Amino acid sequence: MIKKKIKNFFFKKTGYDNIIFAGRANTLIWKIGLYLKQKKKNTTIVLPSSLCVSPAIIFKILGFKIEYIDIDVNSGLINEKLLLNTIRRKKIDAIFYVNLFGNALKNKFYKEAKEKNIFIIQDLAQTFISSSKKNNDDYIFGDILIISFGYSKVFDLNGGALILTKNQNLYEELNKVKMSENEKISGSKQKYLDWYHNDFSKKKKIYLSKVKFANALYIKPYKKKYDRQILQSLKFLNKEEKRRIKILNIYNEIFNHKKIKIINNKSNLIPWRFCFLIKKNRNKILKCLREKKYDASSYYLALTHKTESLKLEKQIINLWMDKSKNKKKIVEQFNIIKKFL
């Protein structure tokens, strides 16, 4: 009964009427990847060059050929001009489109992608659907939508995720995909750990722990308690949307400074964190904010040596928009940062 209410809620807001639940988004990405590999053995997928490393690890392990495309540093989203060029010049089977930093822009590539029968996975990783169906119609377009309720998301339930699709046949085929691949994953973990450290991290000069790498391989079961938690959070969608937009506007006003480049949020979907670029003293600023007990993040890493992704990696700061934030605290954060400008 609760799952049916959740399904009806998303259908009214998005028009997507089929839903699959999981314990975390990575479990669903595994399922989608396995489905695509069943359809075509040699599959090429496009990923933005800035995103969480977990999807890249998953698609690499499953044997996808990955085409990384640079981002637009003003939004953190994949660069549409470069994406269109790739669609026109190369054989692409799927696009993993990520709404990074709470941004979601109208997309010109969609028509050409569908003309070439390219499968589009849209991950609302750092935003959320709007309480307005009109807004959702403008900015939501994937064959599959991924929505997560994990740590630091718009609705943080410390677990739970779902995918939505309008395609009944796709829904039925995804439900048939078994996650028995998990046993194979465990057996080949060291192989891909070696790939990660010898290939990716060597080029990037970073080294993530085995725990963080293994986290990408972790398939989490869906817990019954998530049903009620998700339904309860959805009841506050309109209220949370208004609160976050209000906080975003305060951040925009206070942080209006010539040495701070705010990453545009032009969509009408719910913003995730307040994100901006700063050219000097980024690490000192992060350290000072954290010493003052303010959460601040420098994610995400560039997954390849793409110009704009590398720029974002070195300059990005994310500040939280949780319920503890108000104008007084936002001013306090700005005053900490201003000392380093």
Image (cartoon, rainbow, N blue to C red):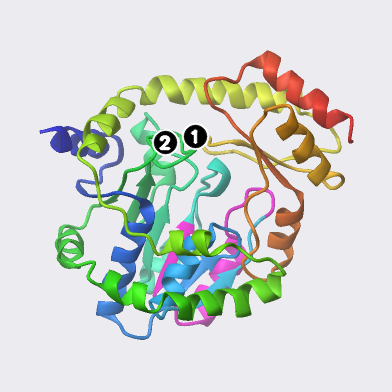
Direction from residue 220 to residue 85 in the image, left or right: right
Q: Which residue is drawn at 39% across and 47% down?
A: 140
Label disc, if present, on residue 221 of the rendered structure: none
**Does residue 30 show up magenta in the picture?**
no
Residue behind mark 1 = 268
Question: Which portion, as a residue range, is magenta?
Answer: 73-97
The correct choice, above or below, for 33 with respect to 322 in the image is: below
Specify the amino acid type for callout 1: Asn
Could you say where residue 287 lies in the image, as x and y percent from the top left? 77, 39
Say which quadrant the C terminus sits in: top right
Quarter of the figure with residue 336? top right
Residue behind mark 2 = 135
Specify the amino acid type for callout 2: Asn
Labels 1 & 2 near each other (Cβ < 8 A): yes
Say which quadrant the N terminus sits in: top left
Direction from residue 144 to residue 256 in the image, left or right: right
